[in-house]
Image (cartoon, coloured by chain):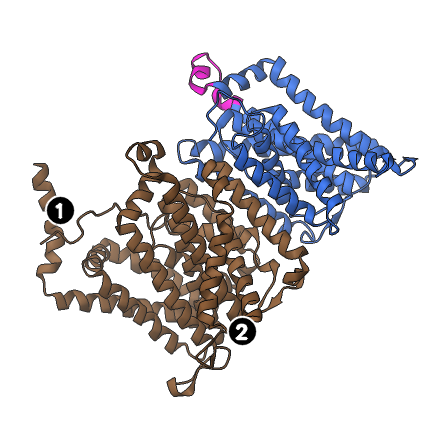
Chain colours: A brown, B blue
């Protein structure tokens, strides 16, 4: 009986594959196009009523798709050809960037969303996979930003891509200072350590004159092969706002981070991390090296945050301790929680909502922390697994044939 | 350094240490009965100070004598926060009892940020620091380099008295017995006929009341309060409780005094006084790496 049920389960998967492969691909492309249109509207529209209308229509549309089982079919389809789906989504965002090429503000928002997605993916690895709490995400983002500023100033001869990489590494290495206390403690205690670290770092940056004190530092623009990112986009490629270059860079970073997160999740890395999160004693007795996985997750997550911070610093051209507050760390945690802890896809819509909505509704800009606080409380109270809960691990995603 | 300076630092450190200890006792109490961290503790403290300020502004119009308004501020401020603490526990903490501890931490963190933002947005001109009335006598005695302010002495004694009373309450009363029983073993306590919910709510009320007291005394001492003061005091109180050993009242006192001592030491050592917090937190993180269960933790309890 059980075997029958298993077969039945895999038959559901077969249905789409036996249909022509082309049709699946077309479906994916259609979905991507729809997403691009919606995102374009979301970023481009300026009047509050237009956005409001979009926000009313969107959930209804999603609900309808869900009811009609189109959404789950779609997810199934995306799962059968993950590479194609990922690439078409990346191309979709690229198209979006080109469509928005003259809109400075929309591109700035898009870039911020992509950078936040990167940091949240790091948090997903720490939180969602290995079960490590990190309430200092913005501190690691800030370390990346400050390293970018300092390295760019002192080692101008180095290629900027290398400097960004170094900034990520600095962030991971400074985070390594916390490894010992974090390994020796758990839960609340570990949370305290990261909170204390975040506050410590901010205070340190504020009082230290070497790093500009409360006034902050100026950051040079990224320059790759003689192309200065703060100039407007080269006219050979169609021209456009200088944010375009940063948006593309952030997109690449987010895509790589996403790919890496998914690969980790699918591999034995993720399996080990999951088991460390769920039961340390059981994992240890099965020979899983707990410190190793905790350290890997922690450093990798901080590395992502550092990379995102470096690009952020170069894009904004100026950084100050005031941009790296504890409440920003809370905001990042809210993104992960709102999406659904451990679900890498879910951080994307969550980051979009949390970053873009306050910018669009000037009324709520002032109240955004209050509103996010209330939203997170409601989510924790009534739907603790988030908007898009992490699905069960599929051990045989392609075994359906 | 001569004795006068030393005594001065000692007195200042004691005032701060007692304030931190009051906050830390709250953390320890909550953790004792429910194994949770209520992270909105610092913001409850801040709200207590703001409630007292609002009460003062109201009473000032009626031109009540100073001692009376001070009493009203203390009583009402503490009681309101005790009520808030109990409500928070009933509606946000207890329903999440079965979910992972991280969720409780997050929900209280977010509740704290809701309180903080509400004060910033809805208290008249709330985003700026507010002057807090100096209601304590301002006499001071000078002994060489020591300038002994009467209000510091009063604050030290009030704080110490509050902690001693809490201790006596927990050790000597029936309710205190119930609290200790719940802390030791929830299920056995229930079997013995202890009203679990009531005991936990009482504990939260007690801890939050202590937080309000320490908020008001911070206001009286510095004569200024602001909407974000709770965040720092909360983190410091939590660090103090953890370093002392969660679940132990003595630990909370030791932790509070230790943190104030570290800050004072940092302020003396470094030319830039702002480094004192960096120094204190660094030592705390190192101490936690060294003794993860705190300096005075229950040996029997599984804390980490």
Q: Residues within 10 Å of mark 1 (few under 14, many from 20)?
A: few
* Chain assignment, label 2: A
Q: Is residue B16 magenta?
A: no
Residue that label 2 marks: A156
Q: Which residues are magenta?
A: B185-199
Name the quarter where the N terminus of chain A is drawn: top left
Residue with the most extreme bottom position? A236
Q: Is residue A291 left or right of residue B130?
A: left
Q: Residue at x 57, y 66 (%)?
A: A150
Q: Is residue B254 visible?
A: yes
Q: Residue at x 50, y 40 (%)?
A: A181
Q: Is residue A42 left or right of residue B253?
A: left
Q: In the rendered view, would you say B281 is above or below A234?
A: above
Image coords of residue B208 (percent x, y): 61, 32
Q: Are marks 1 and 2 in contact (CB under 8 Å)?
A: no
Residue that label 1 marks: A9
Q: Residue at x 71, y 43 (%)?
A: B266
Name the quarter where the C terminus of chain A is drawn: bottom left
* Chain assignment, label 1: A
Mark closest to the chain's N terminus, 1 or 2: 1
Mark 1: secondary structure: helix
Image coords of residue B286 (percent x, y): 57, 39
Which marked residue is nearer to the observer: mark 1 or mark 2?
A: 2
Q: Residues within 10 Å of mark 2 (few under 14, many from 20)?
A: few
Q: Nearer the viewer, residue B230 or A264?
A: A264
Q: In the rendered view, would you say B156 is above or below A330?
A: above
Image coords of residue A223 (percent x, y): 48, 76
């Amino acid at each position: 009986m059980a075997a029958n049920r298993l077969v039945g389960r895999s038959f559901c998967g077969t249905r789409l594959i036996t249909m022509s492969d082309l049709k699946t691909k077309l479906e994916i492309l259609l979905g991507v196009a729809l997403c691009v249109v919606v995102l374009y509207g979301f970023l481009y529209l300026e009047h509050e009523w237009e956005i409001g209308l979009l926000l009313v229509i969107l959930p209804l549309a999603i609900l309808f798709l869900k009811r009609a089982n189109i959404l789950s079919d779609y997810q199934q389809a995306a799962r059968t050809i993950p590479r194609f789906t990922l690439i078409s989504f990346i191309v979709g965002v690229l198209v979006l960037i080109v469509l928005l090429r003259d809109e400075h503000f929309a591109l700035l928002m898009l870039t911020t969303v992509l950078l936040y997605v990167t940091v949240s993916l790091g948090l997903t690895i720490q939180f969602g996979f290995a079960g490590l709490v990190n309430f200092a995400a913005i501190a690691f983002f800030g370390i990346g930003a400050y390293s970018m500023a300092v390295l760019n100033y002192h080692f101008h001869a180095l290629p900027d891509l290398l400097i960004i990489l170094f900034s990520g590494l600095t962030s991971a290495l400074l985070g390594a200072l916390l490894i010992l206390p974090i390994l020796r403690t758990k839960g609340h205690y570990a949370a305290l350590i990261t909170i204390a670290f975040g506050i410590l770092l901010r205070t340190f940056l504020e009082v230290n004159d070497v790093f500009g004190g409360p006034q902050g530092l100026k950051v040079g623009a990224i320059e790759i092969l003689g192309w200065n990112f703060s100039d407007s986009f080269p006219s050979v490629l169609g021209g456009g706002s200088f944010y375009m270059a940063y948006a593309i860079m952030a997109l690449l970073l987010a895509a790589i981070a996403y790919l890496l997160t998914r690969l980790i999740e699918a591999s034995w890395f993720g399996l080990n991390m999951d088991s460390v999160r769920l039961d340390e004693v059981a994992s240890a007795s099965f020979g899983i090296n707990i410190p190793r996985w905790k350290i890997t997750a922690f450093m990798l997550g901080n590395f992502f945050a550092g990379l995102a911070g470096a690009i952020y610093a170069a894009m904004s051209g100026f950084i100050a301790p005031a941009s790296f507050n504890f409440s920003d760390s809370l905001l990042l945690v809210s993104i992960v929680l709102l999406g659904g802890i451990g679900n890498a896809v879910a951080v994307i819509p969550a980051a979009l909502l949390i970053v873009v909505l306050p910018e669009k509704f000037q009324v709520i800009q002032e109240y955004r922390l209050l509103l996010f606080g209330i939203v997170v409380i409601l989510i924790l109270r009534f739907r603790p697994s988030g908007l898009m809960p992490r699905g069960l691990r599929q051990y045989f995603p392609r075994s359906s044939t | 350094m001569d004795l006068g300076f030393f005594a001065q630092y000692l007195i200042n450190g004691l005032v701060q240490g007692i304030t931190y200890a009051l906050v830390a006792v709250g953390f320890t109490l909550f953790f004792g009965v429910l194994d949770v961290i209520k992270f909105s503790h610092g913001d409850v403290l801040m709200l207590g100070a703001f409630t007292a300020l609002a009460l003062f502004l109201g009473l000032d119009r009626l031109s009540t004598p100073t001692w009376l308004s001070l009493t009203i501020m203390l009583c009402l401020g503490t009681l309101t926060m005790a009520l808030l603490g109990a409500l928070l526990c009933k509606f946000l903490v207890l329903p999440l009892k079965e979910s992972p501890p991280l969720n409780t931490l997050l929900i209280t963190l977010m509740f704290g940020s809701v309180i903080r933002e509400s004060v910033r947005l809805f208290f008249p001109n709330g985003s700026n620091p507010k002057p807090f009335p100096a209601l304590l006598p301002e006499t001071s005695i000078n002994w060489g380099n020591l300038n002994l302010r009467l209000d510091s002495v009063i604050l030290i004694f009030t704080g110490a008295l509050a902690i001693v009373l809490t201790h006596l309450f927990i050790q000597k009363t029936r309710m205190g017995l119930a609290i200790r029983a719940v802390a030791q073993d929830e299920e056995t306590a229930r079997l013995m006929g202890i009203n679990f919910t009531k005991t936990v709510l009482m504990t939260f009320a007690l801890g939050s009341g202590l937080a309000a007291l320490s908020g008001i005394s911070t206001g009286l001492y510095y004569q200024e309060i602001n909407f974000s003061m709770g965040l720092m005091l909360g983190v410091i109180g939590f660090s103090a409780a953890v370093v002392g050993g969660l679940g132990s009242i003595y630990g909370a006192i030791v932790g509070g005094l230790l943190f104030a001592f570290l800050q004072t030491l940092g302020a003396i050592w470094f030319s830039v006084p702002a480094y004192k917090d960096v120094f204190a937190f660094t030592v705390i993180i190192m101490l936690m790496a060294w003794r993860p269960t705190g300096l005075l933790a229950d040996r029997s309890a599984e804390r980490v």
